[in-house]
Image (cartoon, coloured by chain):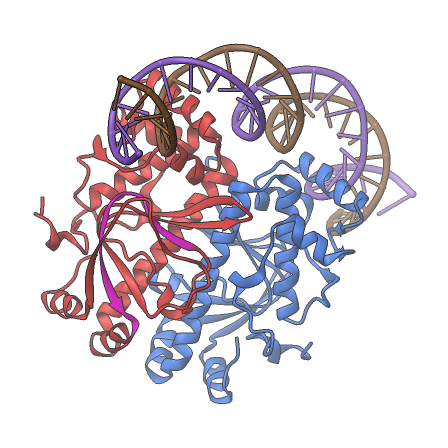
Chain colours: A red, B blue, C brown, D purple
Amino acid sequence: MHLEVEERARFEAAISEVKTLSPRQNVLTAGEPLDHSILLIEGFMSRYIDRNGLRQLVAVHVPGDFVDLHAFSLEVLDHDVATMTAATVALVPHSELEILAQELPKLTLKLRFSTLIDAAIHRAWLFRLGRLNAVERIAHFISETNVRLMSAGLSDGRRFALGLIQPDLAEICGLTNVHIYRVLRQLREQKLCVFRSSLVEILDPEKLADQGHFDPAYLYIDLQSTDALSSHQRPTK
Amino acid sequence: MHLEVEERARFEAAISEVKTLSPRQNVLTAGEPLDHSILLIEGFMSRYIDRNGLRQLVAVHVPGDFVDLHAFSLEVLDHDVATMTAATVALVPHSELEILAQELPKLTLKLRFSTLIDAAIHRAWLFRLGRLNAVERIAHFISETNVRLMSAGLSDGRRFALGLIQPDLAEICGLTNVHIYRVLRQLREQKLCVFRSSLVEILDPEKLADQGHFDPAYLYIDLQSTDALSSHQRPTK
DNA sequence: TAATCGTGATGACACAGGTTAATTTACGTT
DNA sequence: AACGTAAATTAACCTGTGTCATCACGATTA
């Protein structure tokens, strides 16, 4: 998301607190009332639905993402939020967002746009779960994550660090962890990609995207200006 | 969605055209630029992703829904839109929505809220596809639709008209139409619900919701004020 | 050093749901 | 009334993924 100098300054001033979170930590629970939203600065976080012990991830967040901007209007979330890796987050009070909305209508538009992309990603995930088989689902997810991380300056298009383990992939793709293992082995043997918890290596990005029926259009990424919201927090690369 | 008298009047004035659409008609295609949004007044519509002939529904719309309000900010859609039954729709130019947003900030909030609920429904669908088996998926979908139609005054909680056929259910639930038939038969035999294209009859709403792990919280329906946006177009209830 | 625990790696087996194909029913059109 | 087409219904068979159980490995912790 590209911010003007003034917008960025004003936005940073709205941050009430910067926190470090430990990995695998529950951060928000469905139903609790919220008065602030979380901007992810470093690390990976997830949003998931847990009903009767059945867990389904509904989003994976990368640095630069607003994790729960939708809580601003909903007031109460319909899902839980957790860290996947250690993470650094900035908290922005809803009261500040309200003021920001009045002062900088253009920034508000950009924020709304980001929640709409969040929904577009939901839809791509629906397609993934509804119509792709196990190998295709993983291929789709890795391709999507690769593009999002490229846009955040955290992937060169072939290699990136990702804090996810096999059971995470299972909860993302609606599969069991035993089967995730089979799929990863297959992708390795086909020389499409190698997934290790700490590092993902894509050997053939194009074939992988093909296999996952992946087309990045729904991410609405302007490939000209790929600086993430948080890029000022890290050495821009 | 509850609108004040002034809001409703102003909103109706923003409508540029009311159209009747025939059933099973494609209305919008992914990627085409849009300058207006569609409010569904009567009938049922769907949004779906079609990639390489694989079709997955990502939303079903009931009267009172804004079908593509998100197009207002995205400008281009990531999915197609079609009618399921014959339908009446109102077109609202984005330019009018822009003006509306400035004149009536409260209405804008309400509209944003409705796009957030749209996303919350996406998430419930993700859970459905990722974690429920065939019978549970159908039970979940029918329970959800029942609640939404109740809120629109189009279901009494046990019976409602729905223009969906078995292949639609397949594209909603990520199954094949052959298997949909098996599931519907099972639900019939278990005396939970009877699905006919023209009429859905829920014999045991509570058991059906249980079976589908359905909890309506994510619909954010205020059971006190259940008038739909379009309710002024029809005799209420 | 041992003990514990989370993660990854495997195999054997079971079954939910897909595939294919055929038949029947419903419905709109001429 | 006759026709064509799409939907519903059904059966036989197959396969992708789940289930269950075990083992190996490395990282913590006692």
Q: Position of residue A233 (x, y in %)?
A: 12, 54
Choose top left, top right, bottom left or bottom right for residue A145: top left
Horizontally, residue A213 falls left or right of residue B162, namely left
Name the dominant secondary structure of the magenta segment: strand
| Residue B77 seen by the camera | no
Query: Which residue is at 21% across, 31% downward?
Result: A159
Give the residues in magenta: A80-94
Query: Which residue is at 37% across, 65% downward?
Result: A71
Asked if B124 appears above or below A73 in the picture, the reply is above
Q: Nearer the viewer, residue D21 or D10?
A: D21
In the rendered image, the quadrant that contains the N terminus of chain A is bottom left
| Residue A58 seen by the camera | yes
Choose top left, top right, bottom left or bottom right for residue A150: top left
Q: Position of residue B138 (x, y in %)?
A: 65, 47
Horizontally, residue B99 falls left or right of residue B68, namely left
Query: Which residue is at 47% across, 89% downward?
Result: B6
Q: Does B215 appear in magenta?
A: no
